[in-house]
Image (cartoon, rainbow, N blue to C red):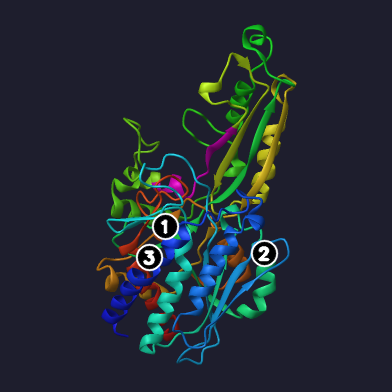
Amino acid sequence: MDHSALAARTAAQWDDDIVPQLTDYIRIPAKSPHYDPAWEAHGHIEKVIRQAEAWVRKQPVKGLSVEIVRLAGRTPVLFFEVPAQGTARSETVLLYGHLDKQPEMTGWREDLGPWLPKLENGKLYGRGGADDGYAVFASLAAIGALHAQGVPHARLVGLIETCEESGSYDLPPYLELLAPRMGAVDFVIGLDSGCGDYERLWVTTSLRGMSAGTLTVRVLGEGVHSGDASGIVPSSFRIARRLLERLEDSASGRILPDDFHAPIPDERVRQAHVAAATLGETVVRKFPFAGATQPMQRELPEAVLNRTWRPALSVTGADGLPAIADAGNVLRPLTSLKLSLRLPPTVDGEAATRAMKALLEKDAPYGATVTFQPDHDATGWNAPATAKWLDTALASASETFYRKPNAAMGEGGTIPFMGMLGQQFPDAQFLITGVLGPKSNAHGPNEFLHVPYARSLTACVASVIAAHAAR
């Protein structure tokens, strides 16, 4: 394989073809079904999956076939197949990504917006480009680069879903339906993860799980004058605070019940120390802290483990709280808080959600009406031991296309598909990687895709697919 030619081809395709495709993709508000229950009527998910299908069909890849697979009442998936080239091996490589997006979020720069793409200094701003609309385009670009040189590869299949940001609840029926067509998958490439910096190939070794739902505390049938009621009617907000204290120590942020913790493997602890040494202060300083705000943990290896192997709670939304401009002197009837509890990779998401519901609803203070309504949960994923061929291939790819050694680290986010695949193909090797690096801000304002990094990552994917065939 001519590595220089491969790098030049993937870079040119990114600049001439993929960036324009992603620019069009970003304009489409294809929010995940959890955030857009009327997704089918609105048609945005249909637009992005048809855009991807049309583009895939045009790729110069011998034997390529692609189709949109549909099950009634579920978001569609894009499935593509490429027969093996130059090898008699029977194994299959599975490439994964998704096209659905997170909602808008506030706080975007005045000249930016979630559906307003802008390319600036090598960064393509807008919702979904990096998380991870680019995956299907990068996958086919990598395969096309191998075909341009006649480089052998195993049979390849791709599965691009449209429900990932909702916890992939539509995916299991598709896995059952498509499993016979996937065949003997022994290598999975997932392009929905992150990178510690933009200088090397990063491999994700674990992913946290999640329990999410809405805690509601109701104390009145309707709001009443606070001067009349306060001191007699308990505050729904104060009760919610007390309930959250059962789950989280507000002074430290530590999650209290043992149900939500798991032992951290020694290998992951060692990797955290290496990642912290590689990244330095970037581990904590990549976040846009306001003013003099300090991180929860200043010991960098411990900060890495906090983000990847320890549970943590975020309150991501609220109802029952009027905007400040509209807030009169009223004791409100209820407070609702959207809770997102990140879980260690080896904690069962469904069991954790049951434990969370029982913890929050038990013995409500003052007899208030308390409910915790789960909306989705996911079990995390911990990678199997890396095979020698893959370890060598990753090191070679990073040195070739980034000129620096590769690195490994767990990720704090959740890709439910990985846990599903780990169960379905327990003997498979995994390359989980992505372009979500410092300040890329997936799910938040000013999300961007680092185009130069993505170019080189695409070349790395092609190189590792070739190494899989040659092992």
Residue 450 in the image: state x and y as whole percent. 34, 59
| Whether residue 4 can be seen here | yes
Of residues 163 and 341, the one drawn nearer to the viewer in this rendering: 163
What mark, if any, has residue 172 been given in the picture?
Answer: 2
In this view, the residue in front, 131 or 182, is 131
Mark 3 in CB contact with mark 2 (< 8 angstroms): no
Is tag 1's residue or tag 3's residue first in the polypeptide sequence? 3
Residue picked out by circle 1: 194
Residue labelled with disc 3: 19
The answer to whether residue 432 is seen in the rendering is: no
- Seen in the image, is 12 located left or right of residue 24? left
Q: Residue at x 64, y 49 (%)?
A: 376
Q: Disc 1 to disc 2, how far (Cα)?
A: 24 Å
Query: Quick check: is 178 in the magenta stretch?
Result: no
Q: Is residue 448 above or below residue 431?
A: above
Q: Who comes first in sequence, dot 3 or dot 2?
A: 3
In this picture, which residue range is highlighted in magenta?
304-318
Q: Secondary structure at mark 1?
A: loop
